[in-house]
Each structure stands twice: as C-alpha cells, then as structure tokens.
C-alpha cells in the first residue's frame, strides 16, 4: 500500500504482540516523523537488550551478568525460593516487598494444548538447586489460571517427596474488590481459606 | 525496576504513541525473548525508514524519491487536487478508488489551542501549485471534526478568490450505519445534503 520502506516497517511492527494493523500504521508514521535522535535511542535500546541481556544461570530471571541482581544480592534469604512462571512475575512479587528470598523462573506453565510439558520448563534446574541443603521452603506462585494451577499441582507432588516445605499463594477476594462481583470460584476459595478474625 | 538495559528499552517503548507502561513491558519482554534475526529486521526497518523516507517536494506525501509515487505517475489526472491533513489520509482515499487526481498533504489542521495556524501547514506550497494553470478543481478532504472544518473553511475562503472550483466531501450517514444511532449533527447534514432519489 505504501512505498517499500514504510510498508516494511508497518509489517514488522504489526508482528509485535498486541500491535494490530492500525497501531502499526500509527507507530510507523510516528517513527517517520519523530526526531532522528529519539529513534536512534529506541534502536539502540533494542540492540543493547538483544546483545547484553541474558538469563540468570541460577534462577532464569533476566540478567546482564551470569547471575541476576537478586541472586547476586547476599542479603536475600537463601533458604526460601519463590517459583514463578515469568520474569515479569518476579517484578510483580518484588513490588509487594513481602518476599525477601530468591526466585526460580520456570519460563512458562504446563499447557498440553500448546505442547508445553514439564520438560519444556526449568524444572530440572529447580531440582538441581534443591541439592543445596540450605533451602527450607518453596513458595509456588504460578498464575491462578488453569495452566498455572496444573503446574503448581505437578510441582507440589514432585517436591513433597523431597521433604521440603511447599506452600502456595492464598486464593481469595482481591483487596479493594467488591464481594458481589467476585466470581464463584474465587468466593469459594475465600470461604475455604477463611481465617480466625482475631489474629 | 529492571536491570539497566531492559528498563531503558521499556522507557523508550513507553514514549511511543499509544503504548502504555504495561504494553511497553510486554513488548520489551517479547523483544528480549524473540529470535535475534526477527529483531534485526525490525531494527533494520526503523533505520531504513529514517534514512530513506522523505516527503514529496510537490504534495508533501511520504516518498522515497524527490516525488512520491502518485506525483510521479503520469496517468493521474493533473487537473484536480485532493487536499488532506496527513499522509495516512492519502491511503484512505486511495483505497476508495474514487479519486484519480493528485493530492496535497497539509501536515495537520488549524488548531489554535495547539498553536497550529495556517502558517504551520503546507498552504503556501498549495498556492504555489495553483500557479500551474492546469488545475481546475480542489477537493477539500480534511477530517470532519472541529479542526478539520476550520481548516476547510479557511482554505475555501482563500481559494474562492482564485477562480478555481473548490468542493468539499459530502457529510451524511455512514454507509452500513443505523439511522437511529447517527448523531444529530450528522443527521442534520444528511438532510441538508439530500439529493434527488431518481438520479
């Protein structure tokens, strides 16, 4: 539709996740009209990430060195590991400031339809870490959806045999939410997980 | 929040129009995990567009040469010019196949709040083209919103004095729309612009 270079850029942008044809066109025109320096910075940032960012050899989180910032930090509690699906989840947990241990990033969740079984996840790497006798608790913090639950169940069963405390994040009503709008599964879990009001 | 390079990429992506913090993060992780070849193509497309794409010296449309593909095409009707706000609008009109003349891209619309007056638009360039006696009609196809209407009124008044036919796109009900959902201004325009049902 457009002359060569612009259409090529629209096509490339359209391949990014969540960018439809209209957004790709708008972005391409923005890039076309933007300051050359700004676009150099954007291109530089992409190139740098592709060149420099790796995955932590211990936990699988993103890292610019062999170990990620969290695995390098000696102040983090070495006895407890929080297992998450993606690097993004590490940030989400970090923001809570509720956890001071280390992480293990699985790289996804068990999803037979997409052909992802336990072997495609970083479960072997997790077992290797457990050889370290320091570890006392594993918190499984997979997503509260079908695939995340399946992954959590698989991991719990496997880890139970190793004599380590395995816990899962509580399910229940989201804080600030409205009881009448909670779905029945969440509300059911909130009842199951009810706790003494005086503690 | 993330280590240097990833956060920098998220920041750069977040500066693009229509990309919020969550989308920027999702895109950054996609870029991080994507095939290196794919990302090279994306970077290459951005660099090529910035290097190669210019604006047509006659009409202001995007072009890879001094003239855009439409101005270069001898089969286009030289006697009629369609005035639009942006290069994107050229494509929209081209898709209709209803117009075989040439274009003039203003580069925006009159918008006093944003500090854009007639001098910031390519109106002088349009007047220069009219020195060419071949031109018989100007179709004003600015956006049907406040700024576009103001621009159209300004242009119509200015061009009237030059003895050229100046027309505007019809306002009315969108095809495939529903009469009861049309806003009152559009419906009013559709009444004003009613035409003989037998032609």
Image (tube, coloured by chain):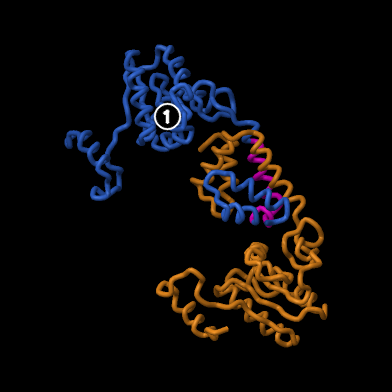
Chain colours: A blue, B orange
Q: Does the segment drawn in magenta span residue A91?
A: no
Residue B90 locus on image (x, y percent): 67, 65
Residue B94 locus on image (x, y percent): 66, 65
Picture residue at 64% right of the left edge, 33% below the top: B36
Residue A58 locus on image (x, y percent): 50, 21
Q: Which residues are magenta?
A: A30-48
Q: Does the segment drawn in magenta span residue A45?
A: yes
Q: Is residue A42 above or below residue A27?
A: above
Picture residue at 47% right of the left edge, 29% below the top: A115
Majority secondary structure in the magenta region: helix
Picture residue at 61% right of the left edge, 47% below the top: A13
**B57 left or right of A17 in image:** right
Residue nearest the observer in this picture, A178 or A96: A178
Q: Is residue B81 above or below residue B50?
A: below
How many numbered discs sit on the rendered protein?
1
Q: Is residue B146 above or below residue B193?
A: above
Picture residue at 54% right of the left edge, 25% below the top: A56
**A117 left or right of A154 in image:** right
What is the chain identity of the residue bearing mark 1? A
Residue A169, quarter of picture: top left
**A21 left or right of A116 in image:** right
Q: Secondary structure at mark 1?
A: helix
Residue B73 locus on image (x, y percent): 79, 64
Residue nearest the observer in this picture, B21 or B88: B88
Residue A76, quarter of picture: top left
**A192 left or right of B13 in image:** left
Residue, disc 1: A112
Q: For the N terminus of chain A, which image quadrant? A: bottom right
Residue A150, quarter of picture: top left
């Amino acid at each position: 539709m457009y002359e060569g270079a612009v259409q090529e850029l629209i096509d490339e942008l359209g391949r990014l996740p969540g960018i439809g044809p209209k957004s790709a066109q708008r972005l391409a025109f923005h890039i076309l009209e933007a300051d050359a320096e700004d676009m150099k910075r954007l291109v530089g940032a992409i190139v740098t990430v592709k060149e420099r960012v790796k995955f932590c050899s211990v936990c699988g989180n993103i890292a610019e060195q062999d170990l990620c910032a969290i695995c390098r930090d000696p102040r983090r509690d070495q006895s407890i590991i929080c297992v998450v699906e993606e690097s993004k989840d590490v940030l989400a947990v970090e923001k809570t400031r509720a956890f001071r241990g280390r992480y293990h990033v699985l790289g996804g969740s068990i999803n037979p339809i997409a052909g992802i079984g336990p072997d495609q996840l970083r479960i072997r790497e997790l077992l290797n870490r457990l050889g370290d006798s320091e570890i006392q608790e594993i918190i499984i913090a997979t997503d509260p959806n079908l695939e995340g639950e399946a992954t959590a169940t698989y991991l719990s069963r496997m880890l139970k045999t190793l004599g380590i405390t395995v816990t899962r994040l509580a399910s229940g009503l989201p804080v600030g939410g409205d009881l009448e709008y909670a779905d029945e599964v969440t509300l059911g879990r909130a009842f199951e997980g009810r706790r003494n009001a005086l503690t």
